[in-house]
Image: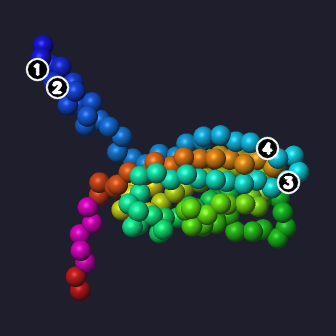
C-alpha cells in the first residue's frame, strides 16, 4: 500500500504542468471608446531575460477595412496594447528558452481584456552550432 501511494505521488509530481499557459483573468468595458485594449501580466520569467519577451497578435476575424492591414502585430511583452480593432485574435506570448503560450480571444469595442501568462522553461535542449 505504501509503495502504491509513493508511486502515485511520484507520478503526480512528474505530471506537473510543463507548458506555458495563457488565460483570461477579466474584462471591463468603457462606453466612450470604440477600440479595444489588452493587458497581459506575465509570470515565471527569468528577470534578466524578461525584457526580451514578445507578444504577437494575429487577427483571425474578417477584415472589413480598406485598405487591408497586416494581420500580424508584435509588441514588447510588458507594454500595454491599445487601439485594437474589435474582433477575434490569437494572442501568443513568447521568449527564447520558454515554451510559448497561446490563446484565442475576442475583443469588443471599448473592452479592456486582462490576461495572465505563466511561462515555463522549454524542455528542448538546443545544441551549439559550429562552423
From mark 2 to mark 4, how far is it between C-alphas?
49 Å
Q: Quadrant of residue 63?
A: bottom right
Count residues near mark 4 (Cα–Cα under 10 Å), then give few for <14, some for 14-19, many for 20+.
some
Where are the magenta residues, as a range?
Answer: 125-129
Q: Nearer the viewer, residue 50 or 94?
A: 50
Q: x, y (%) of residue 51? A: 48, 68
Q: Report which residue position mark 1 lands on.
A: 3
From mark 1 to mark 2, how far is it between C-alphas?
6 Å
In the displayed orientation, state which residue is furthest to the right.
32
Q: x, y (%) of residue 67? A: 82, 70
Q: Report which residue position mark 2 lands on.
A: 7
> Marks 4 and 2: in contact by CB < 8 Å?
no
Q: x, y (%) of residue 114? A: 64, 47
Tell me, what colour scheme is on the image? rainbow
From mark 1 to mark 3, how far is it between C-alphas?
61 Å
Q: x, y (%) of residue 106? A: 70, 46
Is disc 3 placed on a helix, strand or loop?
A: loop
> Marks 2 and 1: in contact by CB < 8 Å?
yes
N-terminal label among 3 and 2: 2
Q: Report which residue position mark 3 lands on.
A: 34
Q: Quadrant of the N terminus?
A: top left
N-terminal label among 4 and 1: 1
Tell me: 50 left or right of 103: left
N-terminal label among 1 and 3: 1
Q: Report which residue position mark 4 lands on.
A: 29
In the displayed orientation, state which residue is furthest to the bottom.
131
- Residue 126 can be seen, yes or no: yes
Q: What number of labels is visible?
A: 4
Count residues near mark 3 (Cα–Cα under 10 Å), then give few for <14, some for 14-19, many for 20+.
some
> Marks 3 and 4: in contact by CB < 8 Å?
no
The stretch drawn in magenta includes residue 82: no
Amino acid at each position: 500500500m505504501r509503495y502504491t501511494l509513493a508511486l502515485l505521488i511520484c507520478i503526480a509530481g512528474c505530471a506537473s504542468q510543463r507548458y506555458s499557459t495563457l488565460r483570461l483573468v477579466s474584462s471591463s468595458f468603457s462606453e466612450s471608446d470604440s477600440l479595444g485594449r489588452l493587458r497581459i501580466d506575465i509570470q515565471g520569467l527569468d528577470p534578466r531575460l524578461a525584457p526580451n519577451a514578445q507578444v504577437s497578435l494575429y487577427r483571425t476575424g474578417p477584415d472589413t477595412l480598406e485598405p487591408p492591414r497586416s494581420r500580424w502585430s508584435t509588441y514588447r511583452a510588458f507594454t500595454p496594447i491599445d487601439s485594437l480593432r474589435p474582433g477575434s485574435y490569437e494572442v501568443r506570448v513568447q521568449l527564447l528558452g520558454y515554451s510559448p503560450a497561446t490563446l484565442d480571444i475576442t475583443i469588443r469595442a471599448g473592452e479592456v481584456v486582462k490576461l495572465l501568462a505563466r511561462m515555463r522553461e522549454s524542455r528542448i535542449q538546443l545544441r551549439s552550432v559550429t562552423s
